[in-house]
Amino acid sequence: NAGVTQTPKFQVLKTGQSMTLQCAQDMNHEYMSWYRQDPGMGLRLIHYSVGAGITDQGEVPNGYNVSRSTTEDFPLRLLSAAPSQTSVYFCASRGSDRRLQPQHFGDGTRLSIL
Amino acid sequence: SQQGEEDPQALSIQEGENATMNCSYKTSINNLQWYRQNSGRGLVHLILIRSNEREKHSGRLRVTLDTSKKSSSLLITASRAADTASYFCATDGTGANNLFFGTGTRLTVIP
């Protein structure tokens, strides 16, 4: 059981480049989300989705786009990379009952913007 | 920000000792969750405690929740070197449909 799979694990970009961080889960979870983790800041929510075709903004959405065409996949797009987006990005998923079900995290994508 | 805060920020103990970490939060919650993160890895869920529960156990882990004080604690008994990691609390608020994470406690268990 793979759980939540993120690719790539590492990426270096130049300012202004665009890229897509991939996230896939095989647990048939409706809820998926993207976080970024910066030193001393904990995890901050970027975007989330409660099901295919439905997305919403989190705490820090600027500079990122998401889409949810299938239950399994939830890619995160950086439109024009900026050094402030250097961070570790985590994708997570959980089942439909938020009162009882924890989130399952991928191992992260470490992104550096030069 | 609705983030919780863990206390202490860092904790260093000898193997076999108990480790206690505290979490304070600001909003009404459905549940509070504790996660562990090993260096360079993703977060792993440890325990979920619902707002109507006061204490929960899982192996060597004990979590308490005091909703009147908006606080929780995580106790790890008989610590092991393998418990060395960062520990985060996260609150599932009654409002927004997502988790709010604290800044974490870095635990070091010395063999």
Image (cartoon, coloured by chain):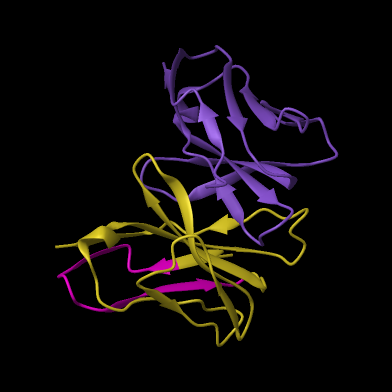
Residue A35, position in %: x, y?
Answer: 46, 59
Please tell me whether the stretch drawn in magenta is mainly helix, strand or loop. Answer: strand
Name above or below for residue B6 compared with residue A80: above
Please tell me the colour of chain B: purple
| Quadrant of the frame with the N terminus of chain A | bottom right
Residue, x 80% and y 41% (percent of image)? Answer: B51
Residue, x 54% and y 44% (percent of image)? Answer: B3
Residue, x 25% and y 79% (percent of image)? Answer: A18
Which chain did the image draw in yellow? A
Q: Is residue A51 left or right of residue A84?
A: right
Which quadrant of the figure has residue B63? Answer: top right
Which quadrant of the figure has residue A78? Answer: bottom left
Residue, x 58% and y 15% (percent of image)? Answer: B18
Name above or below for residue B80 compared with residue B45: above
Q: Is residue A95 left or right of residue B40?
A: right
How many numbered discs sit on the rendered protein?
Answer: 0
Of A94 and A61, nearer the camera is A61
Q: Is residue A12 magenta?
A: yes
Q: Is residue A112 left or right of residue A61?
A: left
Q: Is residue A76 visible?
A: no
| Quadrant of the frame with the C terminus of chain A | bottom left
Q: Is residue A28 magenta?
A: no
Residue B84, position in %: x, y?
Answer: 45, 29
For the magenta stretch, what is the residue range?
A6-26
Of B102 and B83, nearer the camera is B102
